[in-house]
């Protein structure tokens, strides 16, 4: 268990600040009756603050695994905090103004704020990549944990890339001016959606693959913890690789489904076939790894 002294302090402060903001936003959802794009106006600050709590907290733990944290990794983590602050200032500021933050170019000021967010996201992507390289090169004592962390960092980059189609000019709704993108495909943003998450139930939603990919940061280390000491190190490494490959394929599959304008809970035959193939391939790969376990370890078990 890492000591507080080994955790990245700016990330810890940011995590605490986002936890406080999540409480404030939750109160806002409860007491503010305003609705924006089909959701309570404080829903976006709530979702983003919770997401940043998970992201920054997990990243602080990952950096604590480094035998010696270099300057590049430390500075990159601080840059991540700065870009996260910039993004949340815009999101909350626009809520206080009663308007949207994402894709909003209705006025020159709104367009400026959206550009600030866009630049912040690109800078965050680059800083996240630097942290990933630092953890890729480091010699971490627990090989399985290191493997899971590297998979998580890499797949979360894939999750960030899954958001790119939302910002393309072609994503903007036809006939609407001042809108620079959309997360829904085949329908307008703000339509019927899943409870809490708001993901579209009538069309594709690019936020799904983005969400799943980002949370590989937690999912893969959790997989390593669940495997624990039940298997030898080589088997754990192989199972984490299988899990990582399956998780990445799922992220791509969900993004592909959304790009076809298809709601998450209404998959067609082609999507179901792809899901079935992924499940079978993952099960076969995991079975092959378990069958290849060292005979002496199986006997000891």
Image (cartoon, rainbow, N blue to C red):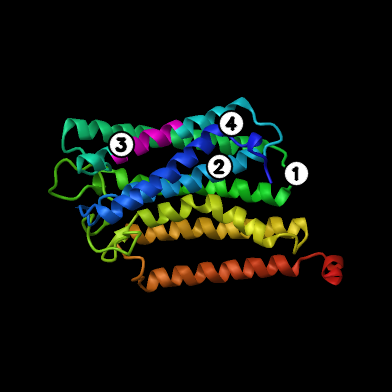
Of labels 2 and 1, earlier in sequence is 2
Of labels 3 and 1, earlier in sequence is 3
Q: Using the image, tell me which numbered label, if any, was put on residue 114.
A: none
Q: Which residue is mark 4?
A: 73
Of labels 4 and 3, earlier in sequence is 4
Give the Cα distance between marks 2 and 1: 18 Å
Check contact, mark 2 vs mark 1: CB within 8 A: no
Q: Which residue is mark 2?
A: 59
Looking at the rendered image, the disc whose residue lies closer to the viewer, 4 or 3, is 3
Q: Using the image, tell me which numbered label, if any, was put on residue 90.
A: 3
Q: Which residue is mark 1?
A: 141
Quadrant of image for the C terminus = bottom right
Of labels 2 and 4, earlier in sequence is 2
The secondary structure type at the circle numbered 3 is helix
Instruction: Describe residue 216's horizontal placement relative to residue 177 as left or right.
Output: right
- How dense is the environment of label 3, judged by Cα within 10 Å: few (below 14), some, or many (20 and up)? many
Where is residue 158? Give x, y as percent. Answer: 48, 48
Region rendered in magenta: 82-92
Where is residue 155? Give x, y as percent. Answer: 52, 49
Looking at the rendered image, the disc whose residue lies closer to the viewer, 2 or 4, is 2
């Amino acid at each position: 268990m890492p000591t507080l002294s080994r955790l990245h302090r700016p990330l810890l402060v940011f995590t605490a600040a986002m936890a406080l903001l999540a409480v404030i936003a939750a109160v806002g959802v409860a007491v503010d009756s305003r609705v924006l794009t089909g959701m309570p106006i404080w829903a976006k600050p709530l979702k983003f603050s919770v997401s940043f709590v998970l992201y920054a907290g997990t990243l602080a733990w990952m950096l604590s695994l480094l035998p010696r944290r270099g300057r590049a990794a430390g500075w990159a983590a601080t840059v991540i905090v700065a870009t996260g602050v910039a993004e949340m200032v815009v999101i909350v500021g626009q809520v206080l103004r009663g308007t949207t933050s994402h894709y909003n170019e209705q006025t020159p000021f709104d367009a400026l704020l959206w550009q600030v967010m866009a630049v912040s996201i690109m800078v965050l992507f680059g800083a996240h990549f630097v942290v990933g390289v630092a953890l890729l090169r480091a010699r971490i004592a627990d090989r399985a944990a290191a493997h899971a962390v590297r998979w998580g960092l890499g797949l979360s980059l894939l999750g960030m890339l899954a958001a790119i189609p939302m910002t393309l000019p072609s994503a903007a709704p036809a006939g609407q001016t001042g809108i620079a993108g959309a997360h829904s495909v085949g329908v307008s943003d703000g339509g019927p959606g899943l409870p809490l998450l708001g993901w579209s139930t009538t069309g594709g939603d690019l936020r799904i693959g983005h969400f799943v990919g980002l949370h590989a940061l937690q999912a893969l280390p959790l997989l390593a913890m669940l495997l624990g000491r039940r298997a030898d190190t080589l088997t754990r490494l192989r199972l984490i690789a299988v899990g990582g490959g399956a998780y990445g394929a799922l992220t791509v599959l969900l993004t592909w489904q959304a790009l076809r304008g298809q709601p998450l809970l209404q998959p067609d035959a082609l999507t179901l076939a792809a899901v079935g193939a992924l499940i079978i391939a993952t099960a076969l790969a995991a079975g092959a790894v378990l069958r290849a376990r060292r005979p002496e370890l199986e006997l000891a078990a």
